[in-house]
Image (cartoon, rainbow, N blue to C red):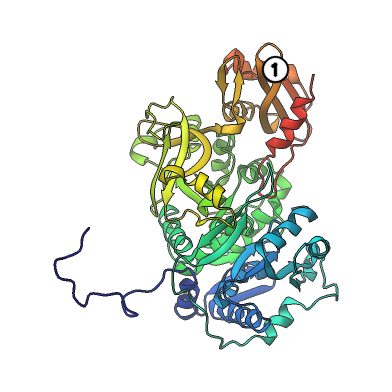
Amino acid sequence: MGWMQDETGLDKCDANYVALTPLSHLRRAALVFANHPAMIYGDHRVTYAQYYERCTRLASALAAKGVAPGEVVATLIPNVPAQVEAHFGVPACGAVLNTINTRLDVDTVSYIFDHGGAKLVLVDSQFLDLAEAACAQMHGPAPMLIEVPDANAGHPASGRHATYEAMLAEGDPGFEWIMPQDEWESLALNYTSGTTGRPKGVVYHHRGAYLMTMGTVVSWRMVLHPIYLTIVPLFHCNGWNHSWMMPLIGGTVVCCRDITAPAIFGAIADEGVTHLGGAPIVLNMLVNAPAEERRSFDHVVEVFTAGAPPAPATLSKIESLGFNVTQVYGLTETYGHVTECLWRGEDWDGLDKPERAAVKARQGVAFPMMENITVMDAEMQQIPKDGSAQGEIMIRGNSVMKGYYKNPSATQEAFAGGFFHSGDIALQHGDGYMQIADRAKDIIISGGENISSVEVEGVLMGHEDVLLAAVVAKPDEKWGEVPCAFVELKPGAKPDPEGLITFARRTLAGFKTPKKVVFEELPKTSTGKIQKFELRKKAQLLD
């Protein structure tokens, strides 16, 4: 196993072995990048030395309020400085960070408070009513609430709870951070969307987050001092771990509370944003923003996009606006992105726009910190890499969750056979690049033929009047089920179901063409994903 014949005295000790943790990045940055801008949010601008002090005060104040190592501190906060600071201040007192989706209903938030056992909750004033109502419904002891006002955004303090800044003022700037002794110690608790039942608690460890930060720097081709705009909600996979990553390379975090085209274009033009992440819906918003909402800029912005596979038409259009998009893929259970469509210049530079966009829509290959990500059949054997055969994406590596909190049976099922089962159906090309065909539950089986909803959506998104499209199965007496398209039109466009079906038939086989088109605003999650489970319910009731 690689042990030499005589390793007497070659033992782990404090000098040669330290548990991996992203907390180390900020402790180093406070010294190496002390005077460099760390965070920007309107008039709030702090250096790394100031950022470190604020996180230290937070850790000290939490400990003084009785938060013990291993206990959970939750947040209900949008992408503002307090949410970024919590990513370091909470684990620095030994606690586990639980960032909660601010768009959840009272019942679900109450369940998460109970299930996760939150000792204290940092809550933005906008969501204080939600937090208080959730506490009132709890079965167990309610957490302490600390209010995070944002008066400039129209959410001043209510006066009902202690405030975040007052708590920081009580903290000790000399507090000694409680660093993990074992890198397998829990760092964060994130809850899945829970669309088919109660959400599951996904537990991250320090090692996985540390390696995620290292792998992302390589895959995103980052150099020192990037300027990162927080589009991905920090309650979603901890913002793909980017808050933990930025101190590693002395980056500046630009907080974005409200995700709008003017806010994004403004941050790029005014703050020089170089990197951002976002779901395809964000790219679509930028592509379709009217001229008065855009700002010009003279540099290329690097974009990671993930979620539902982006339509090639969207990818093709956004490059001309000054964005270079890299498709990535991952899940809550994998700390966010773990595969990337790594650009193969020698093979792809000569492709025309449509071909480039089609290639960029692939989910690609594993990030460097992962061990093995591939596509397997039902017997967990490698599928043929022929661009046609389909199987399930299977994932193995250090940036895979510890498991589901208080749910050993679900954990065992997810890890059966030594891989994490993603539930995503994909094919693999000859070069090993993976391409999602669909979620297993989204495959449409019509007359015994499998139809990829993603393929049909990609064609519909190519129509000049279509803003967004989602395709689900609709019951059919003859075929069992047929494709049903829900379409959100661009402003000013008129519904033309027959015209859209004719457009799709030019590219798709007849059985893949939507048999019904419904025009409406599509339901979306807080991260921009279309809620297909809601559309499936509607499709069941259609004639």
Residue extending furthest toward the front: 409
In the picture shown, does residue 204 fall above or below 457?
Answer: below
Residue 497 position, x and y percent, is 75, 20
Asked whether the viewer can see residue 488, the reply is no
Residue on which the image places disc 1: 515
Q: Secondary structure at mark 1?
A: loop
Quadrant for the N terminus in the image: bottom left
- Name the residue at the top extreme: 478
Tell me: residue 402, above or below residue 499: below
Q: Residue at x 73, y 48 (%)?
A: 292
Q: Residue at x 44, y 68 (%)?
A: 183
Q: From where the camera sits, is residue 181 visible? A: yes
Residue type at mark 1: give it.
Answer: Lys
Q: Name the outermost residue toward the right.
A: 159
Depth check, front residue: 415 or 276 = 415
- Spot occupied by residue 88 in the image (x, y as percentages of width and height): 56, 72
Please name whichever residue, 52 or 64, is drawn nearer the observer in this view of the structure. 64
- Residue 93 at x, y = what percent? 57, 77
Measuring from the top left, give residue 495's x and y in whole percent: 78, 25
Left or right: where 463 falls relative to 368: right
Residue 62 image-quadrant placement: bottom right
Camera-side residue: 477 or 152? Answer: 477
Give the quadrant of the C terminus.
top right
The number of discs equals 1
Vertical placement of residue 303 versus 203, above or below = above
Label 1 crowding class (10 Å Cα cut-off): few <14, some 14-19, many 20+? some
Looking at the image, which residue is at 45% across and 41% down? 394
**Res. 475 image quadrant:** top right
Q: Residue at x 65, y 52 (%)?
A: 295
